[in-house]
Amino acid sequence: MLVDIMKKYNVKTFGSEILGKKAEKVTVFDDKLAELAAAMVEIMNHFDGIGLAAPQIGISKRLVVLGVPDNPEQPNKSIGEVMLLDKMPLVLVNPEITAFGSDLCDYDEGCLSVPGIYGNVKRPYIVKLKAQDLQGNFFEYECGGLLGRCIQHELDHLDGYLFVDRMSEEDRQNIEFKLFRLKKNGKRKEYNRPWK
């Protein structure tokens, strides 16, 4: 199946127009949506990611897959973490964050669309997530830790933002030359990340 996926989809890299656009709401819950989600999980796993949004493979849909690993040593997990980490890989259709916690935390983020570049991003530690599953059923959980961060990162993709857009100006300046090179190299490859 991976060979078929490689022929059909490419991970878009920094500079690709679709990464800067707001994705469209999913309105049809059918086998094609399930197949797209399954392909996204394979792509995410192939590139050793923990999350992937449909715009990252050139599809303007509000669809995200997550593969966040459970950390059994993490204390005080939220109910959402307890419930959802056990269900990975997880598909989120039309996800939205309905509330943000007040506590902020720093973390070095990376992205499959910004390969080889990492940067510090300050985000709320806890978010309240509302989404649908592949059958259109709604669910809502409060999520913290790495899961909460990954949700924020991936939902940013649905609204046309990358983690580098969330960095402080000073931190962003530190990686600006790397971003310039990535964009320049990406242009030659139509902003498609090579399958390796």
Image (tube, rainbow, N blue to C red):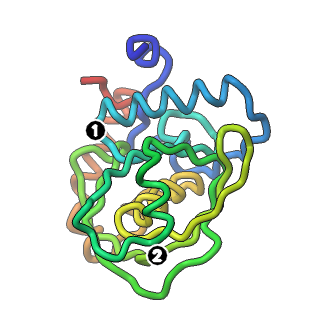
Q: Is residue 107 left or right of residue 57?
A: left
Q: Are marks 1 and 2 in contact (CB under 8 Å)?
A: no
Residue 130 versus residue 53: which sits nearer the camera?
130
Task: Give me the disc on residue 86.
Answer: none
At x 63%, y 39%, the residue is 60
Residue plotted at (60% across, 67% down): 97
Name the front one of labels 1 and 2: 2
167 and 133: which one is in front?
A: 133
Q: At x 57% / y 71%, what residue is drawn?
A: 128
Q: Which residue is under mark 2?
A: 126
Task: Name the quarter where the N terminus is drawn.
Answer: top left
Give the percent coordinates (x, y) of residue 19: 51, 46
Camera-side residue of 111 and 95? 95
Within 10 Å of disc 1 (Cα), the crowding (few <14, some 14-19, many 20+) is few
Q: Is residue 17 visible?
A: no
- The residue lying toward the viewer, choosing from 18 and 188, is 18
How packed is label 2: few (under 14 Cα within 10 Å), some, or many (20 or more)? many
Q: In the image, residue 122 lies at what x, y percent?
A: 36, 76
Q: Position of residue 151 (x, y in %)?
A: 48, 59
Furthest toward the bottom, the residue is 102
Rounded to the nearest angstrom, the CA distance separating label 1 from label 2 is 24 Å
Three-letter code, disc 1 = Asp
Does residue 154 sit above or below 42 in this rendering?
below
The tally of labels here is: 2
Give the residue at mark 1: 48
Q: Residue at x 49, y 69 (%)?
A: 79
Judged from the image, the secondary structure of the residue bearing numbered disc 2 is loop
Q: Secondary structure at mark 1?
A: loop
Mark nearer the N terminus (1 vs 2):
1
| Kind of residue indicated by mark 2 | Ile
Instruction: Tell me, yes or no, if residue 184 can be seen here.
Output: yes
